[in-house]
Amino acid sequence: MKILINTYQAAFITPGGGEVQLMKTYQALQKIGVDVSLFDQWNPRLSEYDIIHYFSVFGGSLYFCQLVKNAGKKLAVSPVIWLDDMSKYPIDEIRAILELADIILPNSQMEADMLANKLELPEDKFMPVYNAVQPEVFKNIDKTLFKEKYGFDKYILNVANIEQRKNQVTLIDAVQGIDIPLVIIGYVRDEKYFEECKKHIGTAKVHFISPFVHNSPELLSAYAGAELFVLPSILETPGLAALEAAAAGCEKIVITETGSTREYFGDFAVYINDVTNPDCIKKCVSYGIDKVEWKNKILSRVIKEKFSWKNTAKKTEDAYNRLWIP
């Protein structure tokens, strides 16, 4: 059984959680012995593979998926999407991609149920595969490295690409009057939105820091040393950075309620039920900071045990085995 992994062309220009998911899945599959390769557009060789695994249903993906099916190959799709407002997405294209798929690998059962319901797809076509972290890197983290490099004592942390979906403008509005700096680490995916973020700073203490290499000592230290991690996105499936922050030992997680976040964090997070409202975000952040009893000292262990890339790879291999007929 030979597997080929692909995604849309522009994905790795400003990589985010979806791209990390793709690469970590690929690497974990290799480690458990799956014969898997990354697509090379200059030498596609579709005929050499049994199953093509496509990540994302981003606009423009349909043509490639049609080529896969026209070549007589099995197609697995990891949609990495949450359809909160159907009017914002190319629904016809997304439905067409998922109808072509022989198996769909959402990041949660909640995502599977949502897609099956909204797009009228058969439930037995779905096999949830959880997003994950790399447990071995979350050991012996130097909590002082990031603080010493940037001169912070306490800080609220947001790690996300700077774009509308990640909702940093509303977050900046929300931290006005909170006497703890907000640190935002991420690629600028939308320059106009970034400029809007800066216009909203006002009297807030906001610091934008360029992204670190994934799982670098600096990023792990930033996670581990944060007073609180906040991800007030419009939606998340579930928010890879939030998983990583928890795995690194950040006990206070404040996250959007929209998406599949509850399936991952359960009772271990504070959920924002209206991410469009700065006051709602502010209440959640303030409550998270002041909350006396956080049960999250075990959260790091739970995340690392349940949501590992090894587990993800095994579940993904199970999905491939459902499709493969020698």
Image: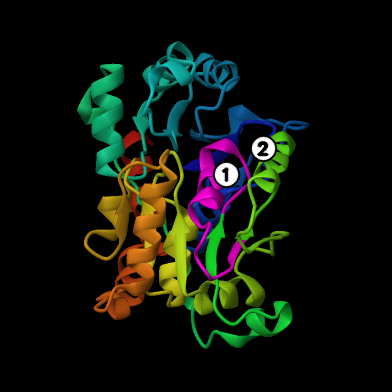
Over which residues does the magenta segment extend?
Answer: 160-183
Q: Are marks 2 and 1 in contact (CB under 8 Å)?
A: yes
Tell me, for residue 109, which label it has, or none.
Answer: none
Q: Is residue 176 above or below residue 273?
A: below
Whether residue 20 can be seen here: yes
The percent position of residue 32, horizontal first and vertical second, equals 45, 62
The percent position of residue 61, horizontal first and vertical second, equals 57, 23
Q: Quadrant of residue 294?
A: bottom left
Tell me, for residue 193, which label it has, or none.
Answer: 2
Reply yes or no: does residue 169 show up in magenta: yes
Residue sitting nearer the eye, 15 or 203: 203
Residue sitting nearer the eye, 179 or 107: 179
Badge 2, how many Cα within 10 Å: few under 14, some, many 20+?
Answer: some
Whether residue 325 can be seen here: no
Q: Quadrant of residue 91?
A: top left
Reply yes or no: does residue 303 show up in magenta: no
The percent position of residue 159, horizontal first and vertical second, equals 56, 58
Residue sitting nearer the eye, 85 or 240: 85
Q: Amino acid at mark 2?
A: Tyr
Q: Is residue 95 above or below residue 174?
A: above
Rendered residue at 60%/59% (across/down): 204
Badge 1, how many Cα within 10 Å: few under 14, some, many 20+?
Answer: many
The percent position of residue 19, horizontal first and vertical second, equals 58, 46
Location of mark 1 (residue):
169
Residue ranking furthest to the right: 42
Q: Which SS class for mark 1?
A: helix
Q: Which SS class for mark 2?
A: helix
